[in-house]
Image: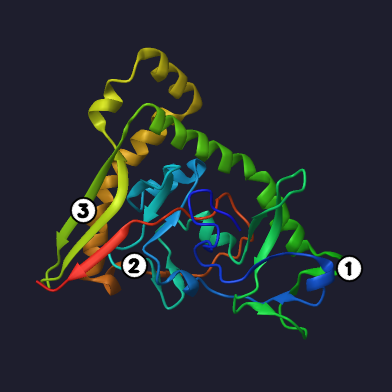
């Protein structure tokens, strides 16, 4: 899998051994049921513009990397405050990037530009036996694999739209560097940097023709959702103070592939004793 903003040798978030699916190499492979425990130690996840409205209701939405990739902040330390015992908080939106795992897409030289892939390092992979759902049947993609491919194909446009949105924010010079600092009740001091937000004054001063264009594209609403989401930092602090009281576990969502690109560089979290 590839990420245009990262080193070519870097792997996308969560993935340890992504491989393009083929009947020759994976004819006997199956996929067992699983949870979202793989996301328990991440403090962020990438999203696409189609998710921004839903995601902004639960998380701060920031921008990261050279492409201004939208990300949701899941914690102020290297931990996901929305995952408990492998289950995602039932009250919060689960990013599509998380739901699609262990499937994804990988860049290729074929005309389509990408191919369905699976993380061979996932504990859900069964290489032999009858446990789980097959990836191939009679040498052809199974229903599970066809659904995964369909998701990747359908949401390729979302990835392109997300890139276009980020480019527009940068072209209008709306993004500014910011950091967040907080002190918890137990005295720990936390810091989050390496991210950008939209500058409100610059946003309000956009030329009329840009405003009209962005309104038609839905980008004005995306910016407003982003700005409103910054209030969710308080929710993260509340969860860190009493995580068990704020999280209700939900069954994992086994949607195969979904509208998300490979990850962008993450914000940096820091913690220290006071």
- Dot 1 surroundings within 10 Å: few (below 14), some, or many (20 or more)? few
Kindly identify which residue carries mark 2. Answer: 81
Q: Position of residue 271 (x, y in %)?
A: 21, 68
Q: Quadrant of residue 140?
A: bottom right
Which residue reaches farthest front?
A: 8
C-alpha separation, residue under disc 1 versus residue under disc 3: 52 Å
Residue labelled with disc 3: 180
What kind of element bears circle 1? loop
**Residue 85 in the figure: left or right of residue 152:** left
Closer to us: mark 2 or mark 1?
A: 1
Q: Secondary structure at mark 3?
A: strand
Q: Earlier in the sequence, mark 1 or mark 3?
A: 1
Q: Which residue is mark 1?
A: 139
Residue 105 picture quarter: bottom right
- Mark 3 surroundings: few (<14), some (14-19) or many (≥20) residues within 10 A: few
Residue at the spot x=28%, y=51% of the render?
232
In terms of secondary structure, where does tag 2 sit? Answer: loop
- The residues tagged by marks 2 and 1 sit, at their Cα atoms, a distance apart of 42 Å
The location of residue 263, given as percent across then percent down, is 49, 55
Quick one: label 3 or label 2, which is nearer the N terminus?
A: 2
Q: Residue at x 17, y 71 (%)?
A: 272
Mark 3 or 2: the one toward you: 3
Which of 64 and 129 lies nearest the eye of the viewer? Answer: 64
Is 112 left or right of 199, judged from the image as shown?
right
Can you give x and y, in whole percent of width and height, for residue 32 in the image? Answer: 66, 77
């Amino acid at each position: 899998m590839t990420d245009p903003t990262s080193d070519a040798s870097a792997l996308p978030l969560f993935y340890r051994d992504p491989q393009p699916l083929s009947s020759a190499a994976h004819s006997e492979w199956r996929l067992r049921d699983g949870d979202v425990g793989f996301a328990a130690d991440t403090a962020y996840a990438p999203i696409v513009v189609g998710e921004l409205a839903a995601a902004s209701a639960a998380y701060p939405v920031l921008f990261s990397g050279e492409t201004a990739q939208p990300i949701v902040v899941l914690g102020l330390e290297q931990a996901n405050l929305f995952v408990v015992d492998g289950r995602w908080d039932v009250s919060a939106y689960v990013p599509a990037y998380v739901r699609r795992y262990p499937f994804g897409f990988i860049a290729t030289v074929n005309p389509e530009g990408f191919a369905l892939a699976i993380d061979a390092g996932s504990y859900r992979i069964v290489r032999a036996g009858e446990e789980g759902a097959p990836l191939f049947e009679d040498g052809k993609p199974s229903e599970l694999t066809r659904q995964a491919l369909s998701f990747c194909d359908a949401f390729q446009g979302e990835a392109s739209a997300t890139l276009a949105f980020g480019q527009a924010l940068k072209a209008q010079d709306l993004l500014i560097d910011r950091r967040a600092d907080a002190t918890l009740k137990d005295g720990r001091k936390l810091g989050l940097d390496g991210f950008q937000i939209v500058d409100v004054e610059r946003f309000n001063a956009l030329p009329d023709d840009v405003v009209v264009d962005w309104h038609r594209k839905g980008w004005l609403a995306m910016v407003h959702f982003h700005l409103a989401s910054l209030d969710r930092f308080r929710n993260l602090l509340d969860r860190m103070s009493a995580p068990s009281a704020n999280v209700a576990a939900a069954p994992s969502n086994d949607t195969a592939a979904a509208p998300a690109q490979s990850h962008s560089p993450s914000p940096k979290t820091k913690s220290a004793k006071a």
